[in-house]
Image (tube, rainbow, N blue to C red):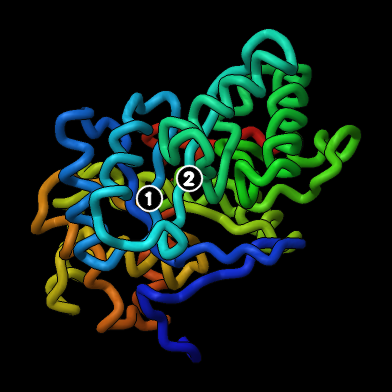
Amino acid sequence: MATKLAITDLLPLPNSTVKIPRLGFGVYRSAPSQCVQSTLNALKAGYRHIDTAQFYANETEVGDAIRSSGVPRSHIFVTTKILVPGGSPEATYDKLLASTEKIGGQDGYVDLFLIHSANSGPSGRKEMWQALERLLEEGKTKSIGVSNWGVKHIEEMKSYAKVWPPHVNQIELHPWSQQRVIDAYCKQHGIIVEAYSPIVRNYKASDPTLVDLAKKYEKTTQQVLIRYALQKGWVPLPKSDNPERIAANANVFDFEISEEDMAVLNALNQGSAGAIVEAVENE
């Protein structure tokens, strides 16, 4: 690649002054008792981007870790997500507010708030987006976006959104599920593409192609997958509760996968069949 990547890199969000760190740390299924320590370990390892959600039931613990980390809040980028609307615009807004308070206290904020899923239907998606726009106007979040949304869902927003395009779309991305249609669409519109499950929950750790590349670069299979995501222009969100792995997953900036080997990894794509969580619907 022409430009050297670094863990300190920040990427600009569309139509915004906000910038997002190039590498994030996910806390999905990190139990509350574990989440504080894992988040502290991530911050110690150099991550400055933490990704949680209402569904993960550990927003409070992420906030606790940030406050006790010694890292200034302004140096940390925190994302959370709402899964379903509250039943009315006001109730949905209250759900958002509850998250910002869990993470940041009474006068707190989050850096990015996402709609976690497209599964609430057109009216539910609209209700959550308009609540997020209100939260953004009030400064309780610095940016807003979506997760698991396909082209049709983002296009649908044009009929009601004051903020368009969404700043971010977080989707499952790795060599076996590259989601090329939505990836290209997002890049065309400047939407930052975040990659969840970038290491495929280690399901592919013994894949022969991946193992061979890991040996070639003298890296772990996880490091190869995270580096692949970075070179694809995605913002990967690897998750681990193991302190050594947390640190290792951030140690991906001292090597570069060649164009030939990127092509080898690209050739592993299985389309929606390769997804372990969810491939988006584009039409």
Residue type pointed to by label 1: Ile
- Identity of the residue drawn at 44% across and 26% down: 54
Judge the density around disc 2: few (<14), some (14-19), many (≥20) Cα neighbours within 10 Å.
many
Residue positioned most to the front = 106
Is residue 175 at least partly visible in the picture? no
- Identity of the residue drawn at 77% across and 30% down: 130
Horizontally, residue 246 falls left or right of residue 280, namely left
Where's residue 66, x and y in %?
32, 49
Residue positioned most to the right = 159
Q: Give the residue at mark 2.
A: 79
Horizontally, residue 101 falls left or right of residue 137, namely left
15 in relation to 133, above or below: below
Instruction: Give 145 or 208, whichever is nearer the viewer.
Output: 145
Answer with mark 2 or mark 1, whichever residue precedes in sequence: 1
Residue type pointed to by label 2: Thr
Q: Give the residue at mark 1.
A: 50
